[in-house]
Image (spheres, rainbow, N blue to C red):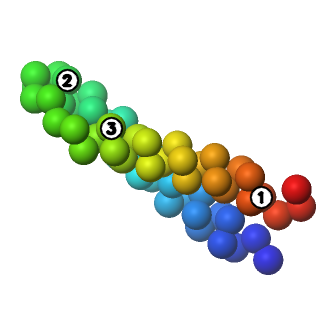
Amino acid sequence: MSIGWIVGSNLATVVLLAGIISLFIGIRKNNHRRWPWWFIGFGVAALVSAAINYPGT
């Protein structure tokens, strides 16, 4: 079943969006943090992993 792929890709998308939104808020407030970049990197890596492990490929 592809439930694991669906949950993983959704979680990766949420983490990626949280990182991007936090990065824009930090830039807007002139508050530069490092953790949004970690979230973005983790989200991209998880989406690449989900695409590689997509059922049927």
Q: Residue at x 66, y 72 (%)?
A: 4
**Which residue sits furthest right?**
56
Looking at the rendering, which quadrant does residue 50 occupy? bottom right
The C terminus appears in which quarter of the rendering?
A: bottom right
Q: Residue at x 66, y 64 (%)?
A: 6
CA separation in Å, label 3 and label 1 = 25 Å
Please name the residue that numbered disc 3 is placed on: 37
Q: Residue at x 82, y 64 (%)?
A: 55
CA separation in Å, label 3 and label 2 = 12 Å
Q: Residues within 10 Å of mark 1 (few under 14, many from 20)?
A: some
Residue 39: image x %, image y %?
36, 47
Labels 1 and 2: the sequence-earlier one: 2
Q: Is there a contact, CB below 8 Å, between mark 1 and mark 2? A: no
Residue 2: image x %, image y %?
76, 71
Give the SS element for disc 3.
Answer: helix
Give the SS element for disc 1.
Answer: loop
Give the SS element for disc 2.
Answer: helix
CA separation in Å, label 1 and label 2 = 35 Å
- Is 57 left or right of 6, judged from the image as shown? right
Q: Residue at x 24, y 44 (%)?
A: 35
**Which residue sits furthest bottom?**
1
Please name the residue that numbered disc 1 is placed on: 54
Q: As shown in the figure, which amino acid type bears the numbered disc 3?
A: Trp
Q: As shown in the figure, which amino acid type bears the numbered disc 2?
A: Ile
Please name the residue that numbered disc 2 is placed on: 27
Q: As shown in the figure, which amino acid type bears the numbered disc 1?
A: Tyr
Labels 3 and 1: the sequence-earlier one: 3
Q: Residues within 10 Å of mark 2 (few under 14, many from 20)?
A: few
The tag on residue 38 is: none
